[in-house]
Amino acid sequence: MIGSSTRLRIVGHGASTRVRLIGDWNGRPLDAIREARGAQRALEKMLREQVRAARQTGRSWSEVGDALGTTKQAAWERFSASG
């Protein structure tokens, strides 16, 4: 587990969103990988929930694809099982 002196923060918004690493991540690279993977899972869950919400409010796969920066087909292939 990462100690309190190492943190991962998501900062900014839109195209300027970045991950900021605080502390000595190089000293414990496997812990850093685990922490990054946890953040990745949380973001993927949020993305799936928001795609589901968009579809439930009547947004098209084309609109979802545009928001994701991809095609409607790619959006459908990735998220259609989510709703």
Image (cartoon, rainbow, N blue to C red):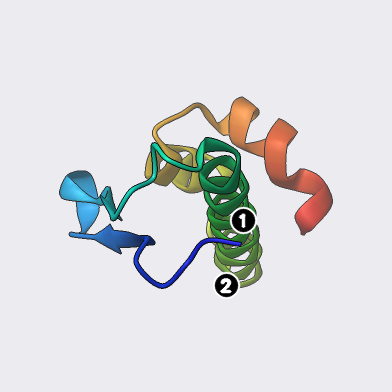
Tell me which amino acid carries mark 2: Thr
The circle on residue 57 is 2
State the SS at label 2. Answer: loop
In this rendering, position of residue 9 left or right of residue 37: left
Residue at 49 percent of width and 38 percent of height: 65
Mark 1 vs 2, N-terminal side = 1
Q: Residue at x 31, y 60 (%)?
A: 10
Q: Distance between the residues labelled 1 and 2?
A: 29 Å
Nearer to us in this view, 82 or 56: 82
Q: Mark 1 points at which residue?
A: 38
Q: Position of residue 9 (x, y in %)?
A: 32, 62
Q: Which residue is drawn at 47% across and 67% down?
A: 3
Classify residue 49 as left or right of residue 15: right
Pick the quarter of the image with the C terminus: bottom right
Residue 42 drawn at (x, y percent): 60, 61
Per the image, label 1 sits on a secondary structure element best described as helix
- Residues under numbered marks 1 and 2 in contact, where contact means CB atoms less than 8 Å apart: no
Looking at the picture, tell me which residue is in the foreground, 76 or 48.
Answer: 48
- As displayed, is residue 72 above or below residue 68? above
Quarter placement of the N terminus: bottom right
Q: Is residue 45 left or right of residue 24?
A: right
Which x, y percent locates residue 59?
53, 59
The residue sitting at the front extreme is 27
